[in-house]
DNA sequence: ATAATCGGGGGTACTGAGTGCCATCACCGA
DNA sequence: TCGGTGATGGCACTCAGTACCCCCGATTAT
């Protein structure tokens, strides 16, 4: 029944447009009562993003069982890849939805709130992992935003192309920029060097002392 | 008249809540016709963010006349500071609005779309400045997202505190993280090299902190 | 001075999203 | 067979947002 509503709504939206379609049109095409529409979807916009609630739950579960010793940046990147897999699983639907959200401001806004929940989930995970750092919360927010931006950059390029090419590889490449910049293997923090008994801290000349201390502290303890 | 509507709406929203206030309540308090409300604001939510349209225009103008030779990351940070100045200019209003948007999902969503327009403006500027780079567009999106995240991190901390303390300094510190990472002077690419600009401190695990600090200090301040 | 024009504001009626409430029906255990 | 429960349909309502028309005051041309 959910699926029937989604299919009916999506067909009508693609055909005559979002604003030109009323809830009555959708429910009469799907053959259900008007009241039932709002039992399954809280708003007209929500029917365009029917799978994101489940995906957000998946992401939350995934991050909760993540290895506390692993690189948190890699982990949130993997979490973002969960979202990508959902898009890539239904290329036709994803591309059609992209066409729709591009044109309808209301849907764009709704998509923003969906993406925002993903971003806050990623940031929440990073915040717990960076709790020891003095600037942990800031770092978490910035990295979460960067991951989402990189993910969306590659995803949107793929959607714009109509679903051609390998999204997975494109997203991997985009996320690589974030991992290289913020991941455990990046310049600041532990070097990927040979001896794990050794900690290397790299800083530019003129770096404020408190920042250096922070970096070393974070690398040494644990 | 705009101001009268904003004041009336804000008072009622703070008093009985957003959903509990109708447009009729607002216009009757402001002493204007209902139709006039929608002449000034496209929606009930928009009245809560009356100054962002002008601020977005300011930001666009600021970036258009930016020095083409300057560090684009510094420029978008300065652009973000324009937004901050708007918030800091009316602490009481900003804090009240924050309390409101925190509670009302509709307003949070609307705020997201406002922030999104800022972010796209910053990203657009960075894209033109990074046009020469192969990964220019990706970089632009990631940096814009990072700048917005850092800005919002400090801004929200200030709003949560009720407007206490120096927001400007907090935002500067938060944006510093982004500039250090992505700005022209960042350590990108130099970490593995033996560049004389780079100082490396090596220590064994368990090294007393004071000794690490001593070593780094001695190396950094010549 | 009078008439024509024009722009800001008001009023009315309408569409359509979203909600609350109740009736209905299928299913299920006792 | 009966009572309970959960899913659905139907009805009526509120309210945001819009289309359309009116009013009024100011400006300007004749």
Image: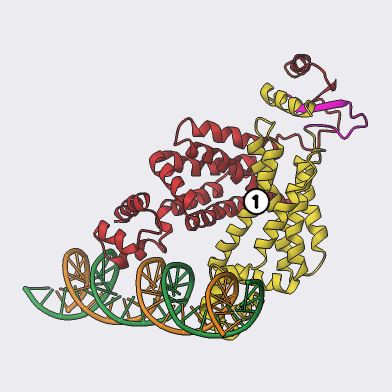
Chain colours: A yellow, B red, C green, D orange
Q: Is residue A103 visible?
A: no
Against C8, is B117 above or below?
above
In x, y percent, where is residue D4?
55, 71
Q: Is residue A123 visible?
A: yes
Image quadrant occupied by the C terminus of chain B? top right
Which span of residues is magenta-colored? A189-205
Q: Residues within 10 Å of mark 1 (few under 14, many from 20)?
A: many
Q: Nearer the viewer, residue B189 or A88?
A: A88
Please report the residue visible at 69 percent of the width from the left and 26 percent of the height from the top: A211
Tell me, yes or no, whether the highlighted magenta stretch contains residue A196.
yes
Q: Secondary structure at mark 1?
A: helix
Taking the image as shown, residue B7 lies to the left or right of residue B94, namely: left
Taking the image as shown, residue A88 lies to the left or right of residue B107, namely: right
Please report the residue visible at 73 percent of the width from the left and 47 percent of the height from the top: A64
In x, y percent, where is residue B109?
52, 57
> In which quadrant of the rendered view does residue B20 lie?
bottom left
Image quadrant occupied by the N terminus of chain B? bottom left
Chain letter behind tag 1: A
Q: Which residue is mark 1?
A: A119
In x, y percent, where is residue B22?
35, 62
């Amino acid at each position: 029944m959910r699926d029937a509503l989604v299919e009916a709504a999506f067909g009508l939206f693609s055909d005559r447009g979002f604003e030109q379609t009323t809830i009555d049109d959708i429910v009469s095409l799907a053959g259900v009562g008007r009241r039932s529409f709002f039992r399954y979807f809280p708003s007209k916009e929500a029917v365009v993003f029917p799978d994101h609630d489940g995906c957000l739950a998946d992401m939350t579960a995934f991050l909760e069982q993540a290895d506390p010793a692993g690189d948190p940046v890699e982990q949130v990147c993997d979490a973002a890849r969960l979202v990508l897999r959902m898009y890539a699983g239904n290329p036709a639907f994803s591309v059609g939805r992209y066409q729709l959200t591009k044109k309808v401001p209301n849907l764009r806004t709704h998509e923003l709130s969906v993406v925002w929940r993903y971003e806050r989930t990623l940031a929440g995970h990073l915040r717990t992992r960076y709790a020891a750092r003095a600037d942990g919360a800031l770092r978490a927010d910035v990295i979460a935003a960067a991951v989402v931006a990189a993910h969306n950059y590659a995803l949107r390029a793929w959607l714009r192309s109509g679903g051609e090419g390998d999204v997975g590889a494109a997203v991997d490449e985009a996320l690589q920029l974030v991992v290289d910049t913020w991941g455990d293997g990046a310049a600041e923090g532990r070097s990927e060097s040979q001896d794990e008994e050794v900690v290397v801290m790299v800083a530019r000349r003129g770096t404020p002392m408190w920042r250096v201390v922070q970096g070393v502290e974070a690398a040494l303890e644990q």
